[in-house]
Image (cartoon, rainbow, N blue to C red):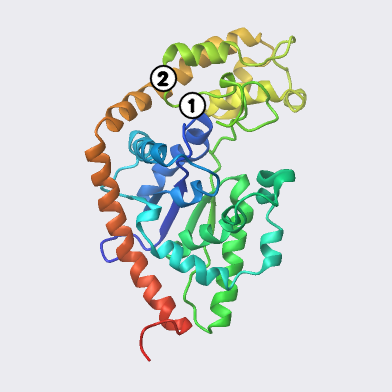
Amino acid sequence: MSKESKFSERVLSGVQPTGGLHLGNYLGAIKNFVPLQQKFESLFCVVDLHAITVWQEPSELVSKKCEVAAAFIASGIDPKKSIIFNQSQVPEHTQLSWILNCVARIGWLNRMTQFKDKAGKNRENVSVGLYTYPVLMASDILIYKATHVPVGEDQKQHLELARDIVLKFNNDFKREVFPLPKPIIMDNAARIMSLRDGTKKMSKSDISEYSRIMLTDTDDEIAKKIKKAKTDAMPLPGTKKELENMPEALNLLTIYSACQDEEFDLVFDKYHGKNFSELKIDLIDVVINKISPIREEMSRLTTDKKYLREILDVGSSRAKKIAADVLKEVYEVTGLNSNI
């Protein structure tokens, strides 16, 4: 680990600046990054290179990056304890990515289900970057020799690819250059679904604004969206078995549990058999209490662009020091160093 760190293990994760962070981003990822600072040398990245695998308006990308950095800090990630940085400002990510492209196999990428889901029927017209995205993700991890990576359900396959690349790289070059990154399965990470359809993940790309709660929503907007959330005509189920067939009910209870840091079973016991209106009234208060301080701090931070720029510049500089040493080792091992 880096000389400045007191930890023997390192964790890395990132969030894409694709515009508009919602409750699912917070409860499923950002909220769970915070306690990692106490156990690992921590790097949290604004992954703008991943964002441009689909079109991003250049004039808007800067403000989106500021929003992610502000969300990190407002949620409790401390720039004095962790390295908060901008992926594109550490060119070693892409330098290593090319080398790893030459290690990874086409067959491995062809198995990536997320590409198939995102490309859909239009796969011949999507960017090459969207296809090779998992290799860049592997590079993000390996350029810091991260030992642990927090992953959600949709990223498990990408981490497995990174592990396959590590095994092949180390074997090909007969040297243990990279550690095998271990997944941190966030037991308390909530999978938050759409308020309009409990079978689909909450997403900013959904047509309906009422499908998601944004971290920038006002208290009134939060209340209105929860009131309009899709529910069943019947009361909340009386048993867990019945809950399996009521995805909207499961989603609202999950949001309550995650926002309150309360065991799901306790929340279920509190509301089973009751009318949805009772749950919604309480849920509005719970979500507002969780989101409003984050929203207010994000608003304050995003108006101070100079401060956010300093945080990202310092973080990128610290990250680059680690990455440069790793890339130098990789160049030596692969024969790409300048010595002739």
Q: Is residue 304 left or right of residue 286?
A: left
The percent coordinates of residue 220 (x first, y second) are 45, 11
- 137 is higher (above) or lower (below) than 165: above
Q: Residues within 10 Å of mark 2 (few under 14, many from 20)?
A: some
The percent coordinates of residue 41 (x first, y second) are 36, 56
Q: Is there any visible trace of residue 41 in the rendered image?
A: no
The percent coordinates of residue 203 (x first, y second) are 58, 32
- The kind of residue tagged 2 is Asn
Q: Is there any visible trace of residue 190 in the rendered image?
A: yes
What residue did someone put label 1 on? 259
Q: Is residue 56 left or right of residue 269?
A: left
Q: Which mark is residue 289?
A: 2
Q: Residues within 10 Å of mark 1 (few under 14, many from 20)?
A: many
Circles 1, 2 touching at the beta carbon (< 8 Å): yes
The percent coordinates of residue 251 (x first, y second) are 63, 25
Which residue occupies 56% across, 42% down? 187
Q: Which of the image's four quarters has the N terminus?
A: bottom left
Q: Which of the image's four quarters has the C terminus?
A: bottom left
Which residue occupies 30% across, 65% down? 321
